[in-house]
Amino acid sequence: MKNDLITLAIETSCDETACAVVKNGEEILSNVIHTQIDIHKVYGGVVPEIASRNHLLKISSVVDRALSDAGVTFSDIDFISATMGPGLVGALLIGLSYAKSLAYSLDIPLVGVNHLMGHISASFIQGAKPPFICLTASGGHTNITRVDNYNKYTLLGKTLDDAAGEAFDKVARSLGLEYPGGAKIDEKAKSGDVNAITFPIAMENNLDFSFSGVKSAVLNYLNSKKMKDEKININDVCASFNRCIVDTLINKTFNALRQEKMEVLCVGGGVMCNDMLRDELKKRCEKEKVKLYLPDKIYCTDNAAMIGVCGYYNYIKGIRDDLTLNANPGINLI
């Protein structure tokens, strides 16, 4: 009698075509990601129509590779997990339609997964167990969440304007750095002085984020330098801006830990690939004796393994979706 539960998970919320095979919500049998970075680099950002077209071209081969890497066949899959939002509607529809077709043809259950809950679930891969506070920072979202169990979340703070990753990309574009901007800023920052330029930090007496102010401050600084025909030290700009974003994320998160009287911190989202942020989080957690679950970078970027883990906990709770499930590009965490 089979006791293991195996899910095939699909993620196509933006410009990564991803598929994973996950056993019992914790063992990653395979995790295949096809990125479109080189395609969108020419345009300075993701072009939705091009992203959708490339998902359509790649999804079958990515699924086949995930099954092959895991050493399983479709007959071994118990249910399908798929991202249903938030994200780019066209991209979401490619992955979700493919997942629905698989579930129908294999006559197995379909479980829709909230992409933001997927990023939180990446910490479960590292062995985290609720309750904990989770900081999620990506190109589209920046949230602080209290996680009481595998399916119960309380949103404590969110971005009021630009997400952290969005601010990185916009500043990078103004500096002439190629997409993806966040990675390029992090790289340049390592050769710059974090104290060279003072940019404002929005620290109101709450747990919400606002990054439009610091983004505008950087743009004003650059425009002022250009108008005066003064040299711009790009490394210093990147280092100072990077430090500002990192400090904001960390300070708000530790405010949440104190407010909720929690001693366990999990993190997720593409911004968590930022080396300065990862290093500063480790130092701060060690100093304040907070247990940190920091996923490997592959599980911070968009991936299907986290969708499979989240799908597993939805499945064992009894959550099922029928074939009328539609993409919801604007769905919130809660």
Image: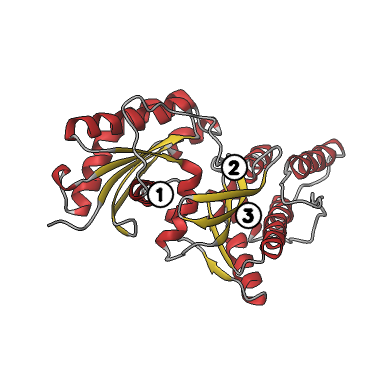
Q: Amino acid at mark 1?
A: Cys
Residues at discs 1 and 3 in contact (Cβ within 8 Å):
no
- Name the amino acid, label 2: His
Q: Amino acid at mark 3?
A: Lys
Q: On the image, numbered disc 3 is attached to which residue?
A: 188
| Distance (Cα) linking label 3 and label 2 | 24 Å
Helix, strand or loop for disc 3: helix
Q: Residue at x 16, y 48 (%)?
A: 76
Gap in angstroms between the C-alphas marked 2 and 1:
18 Å
Inter-mark Cα distance, 1 to 3 = 35 Å
Q: Residue furthest right?
A: 228
For label 2, the residue is 141
Within 10 Å of disc 2 (Cα), the crowding (few <14, some 14-19, many 20+) is many
- Residue holding disc 1: 310
Decide if residue 221 is on the left or right side of residue 175: right
**Picture coordinates of residue 130, whole percent (x, y):** 50, 62
Identify the mark nearer the N-term, 2 or 1.
Answer: 2
Q: Which of the marked residues, 3 or 2, is nearer the chain's N terminus? A: 2
User: For numbered disc 1, what is the local secondary structure?
Assistant: helix
Which sits in the foreground, 261 or 304? Answer: 261
Tell me where residue 288 sits by quadrant: bottom right
The correct choice, above or below, for 333 with respect to 129 in the image is above
Q: Residue at x 48, y 33 (%)?
A: 40
State left or right for residue 59 relative to residue 293: left
Q: Position of residue 27 (x, y in %)?
A: 30, 60
